[in-house]
Amino acid sequence: ARLAIDLRSAASGNQLELYYQPQNCTSTRSLVGFEALVRWHHPTLGMVSPGEFIPVAERTGLIAEIGEYVLRRACADAAAWPGGYKVAVNVAAYQLTRIDLPTLVDEVLKETGLAPERLEIELTESGLIADHARALATITRLKALGVSIAMDDFGTGYSSLALLQHFPFDKIKIDRSFITDVANRPRAAAIVRAALLIAESMNIPVLAEGVENEEEFAYLRDAGCPAVQGFLFGRPMPLSSVQTLMLREQ
Ligand code: G
Ligand code: G
Ligand code: MN
Ligand code: NA
């Protein structure tokens, strides 16, 4: 309850900060983009993790304001990056079905000057099953703007395959629960390989989440997974570190 009250002042933006986590191409190891991950600097509690406050924000509807802040900040930051790196932004169920997200995205892209091709919207299963028809209409309009749509946490929901059948995703992000120690866990490895095969048949690129070490990386590379994200290539970091990383990459 306390969090919900404090979140109201955070939602205005001045206690929120975006961290960014690198996403890399598997074959070249080169940087391709970043996922934006919000952080809340609470005046007395210190840093509160999004795992704690995003669910509260979703229940109270404050996610609309927080999400708008995140979208504006991420697009403005990315517009200033050299080299055309992409930015991925997480969008909650509420934003997909209860607000006019495509109009907001269109407005933010125009305001910030970010090319639509450089923005990716990450959706989780919960965001898609709440209102299937509305979600599909929203996704269709977002794609018409030139923005791409990624399915986040693939494999962890109740209907991953059904959603993959019905929604026109541009990317699949395999959940990190399958990636942890994948080379030594035959059942996880079988699921990862099957997901890669399905995605390849659908012509959808895959990104593996939560890649923490070279053993996991080598397994994914050899299995043909085109992109990775995880502590091996970088933890979520503040904008200043992103700029340093991009300079090093050039
Ligand atoms: O960064 P971290 O691993 O602590 O994130 C925890 C969870 O919070 C993840 O599931 C992530 O997708 C979610 N999250 C982080 N930033 C945002 C955001 O800006 N919007 C939404 N809806 N979820 C976010
Ligand atoms: O749900 P989503 O995939 O958006 O959330 C990303 C979350 O995963 C963030 O909270 C981020 O901190 C976390 N994360 C990213 N890479 C790794 C990793 O390599 N290992 C672990 N344990 N967590 C990670
Ligand atoms: Mn995500
Ligand atoms: Na995820």
Image: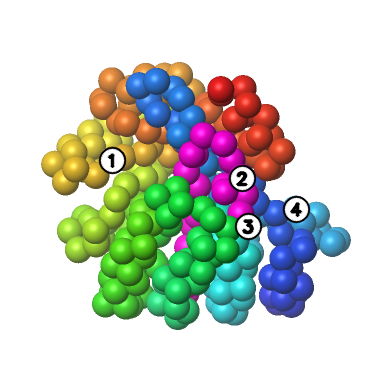
Gap in angstroms between the C-alphas marked 2 and 4 = 26 Å
Q: Range of the magenta residues?
A: 76-95
Q: State which mark lies toward you, 1 or 4.
A: 1
Asked whether, in this view, residue 67 is left or right of residue 196, the answer is right
User: Which residue matches tag 4?
Assistant: 47
Disc 4: CA contacts within 10 A as few (<14), some (14-19) or many (>=20):
few
Gap in angstroms between the C-alphas marked 1 and 3 = 26 Å
Q: State which mark lies toward you, 2 or 1.
A: 2
Q: Is mark 1 within 8 Å of ligand 3?
A: no
Gap in angstroms between the C-alphas marked 1 and 4 = 34 Å
Asked whether, in this view, residue 139 is left or right of residue 166, the answer is right
Q: Indicate the secondary structure of the residue bearing disc 2.
A: loop
Sequence order check, earlier mark of 3 and 4: 4
Query: 211 and 67: which one is in front?
Result: 67
Gap in angstroms between the C-alphas marked 3 and 2 = 11 Å
User: Which residue matches tag 2?
Assistant: 80
Disc 3: CA contacts within 10 A as few (<14), some (14-19) or many (>=20):
some
For the C terminus, the quadrant is top right
The part of the image, by quadrant, that contains residue 147 is bottom left
Query: 206 and 30: which one is in front?
Result: 30
Q: Which amino acid lies under the numbered mark 3 shown in the image of this protein?
A: Arg
Label placed on residue 18: none
Q: Is residue 232 above or below residue 86?
A: above
Disc 1: CA contacts within 10 A as few (<14), some (14-19) or many (>=20):
some
User: Which residue matches tag 1?
Assistant: 205
Q: Indicate the secondary structure of the residue bearing disc 3.
A: helix
Circles 1, 3 touching at the beta carbon (< 8 Å): no
